[in-house]
Image (tube, grey):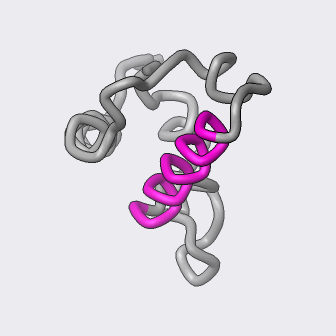
C-alpha cells in the first residue's frame, strides 16, 4: 500500500501553502489562540481572517462546490499542512 500523497494531493497542499502566505495576517496565532476569548479587536481580527478563508473557499473544503466548498476528499482534508 502506498501511503504517499498523490501528485494532485501535493498540488492541493501547495496551493493552500501559497494561499496562506498571501493573505495571512502578520500577527497570526495558533488555532487555540484564534478561538480564545479576547478583546473586541481580537474578535474583529478573527472575523476578518475567517472571511478571507471563506472567500478563498478554505473553510468547509469537503463540502460540494455548489455550496461553497471544494469537494475535497478526506485525504486532502487530513493532508493540509498545519499552520
Q: Position of residue 27 (x, y in %)?
A: 39, 24
**Along the line of sight, the residue nearer the viewer: 24 or 44:** 44
Residue at horizontal 55%, vertical 39%?
Answer: 77
Residue at horizontal 53%, vertical 42%?
Answer: 45
Residue lying at the far bottom of the rendered structure: 66
Q: Main secondary structure of the magenta part?
A: helix
Residue at horizontal 36%, vertical 28%?
Answer: 5
Quarter of the picture containing the C terminus is top left
Identify the image quadrant of residue 9: top left
Question: Is residue 70 in the magenta section?
Answer: no
- In the shown orientation, is residue 31 left or right of residue 83? right
Q: Position of residue 29 (x, y in %)?
A: 50, 19
Q: Position of residue 34 (x, y in %)?
A: 63, 27
Question: Is residue 44 in the magenta section?
Answer: yes
Residue lying at the far front of the rendered structure: 40
- Does 68 sit above or below residue 60? below
**Along the line of sight, the residue nearer the viewer: 6 or 71:** 71
Count every numbered label the image shows and give the total.
0
- Does 60 sit above or below residue 23? below
Range of residues picked out in magenta: 41-56
Identify the image quadrant of residue 33: top right
**Along the line of sight, the residue nearer the viewer: 41 or 5:** 41
Residue at horizontal 53%, vertical 75%?
Answer: 65
- In the shown orientation, is residue 67 left or right of residue 2? right
- Does 25 sit above or below residue 31? below
- In the shown orientation, is residue 2 left or right of residue 6? right
Amino acid at each position: 500500500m502506498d501511503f504517499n500523497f498523490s501528485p494532485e494531493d501535493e498540488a492541493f497542499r501547495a496551493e493552500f501553502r501559497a494561499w496562506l502566505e498571501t493573505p495571512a495576517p502578520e500577527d497570526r496565532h495558533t488555532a487555540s489562540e484564534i478561538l480564545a476569548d479576547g478583546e473586541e479587536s481580537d474578535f474583529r481580527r478573527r472575523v476578518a481572517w475567517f472571511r478571507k478563508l471563506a472567500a478563498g473557499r478554505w473553510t468547509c473544503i469537503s463540502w460540494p462546490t455548489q455550496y461553497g466548498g471544494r469537494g475535497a476528499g478526506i485525504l486532502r482534508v487530513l493532508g493540509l499542512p498545519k499552520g
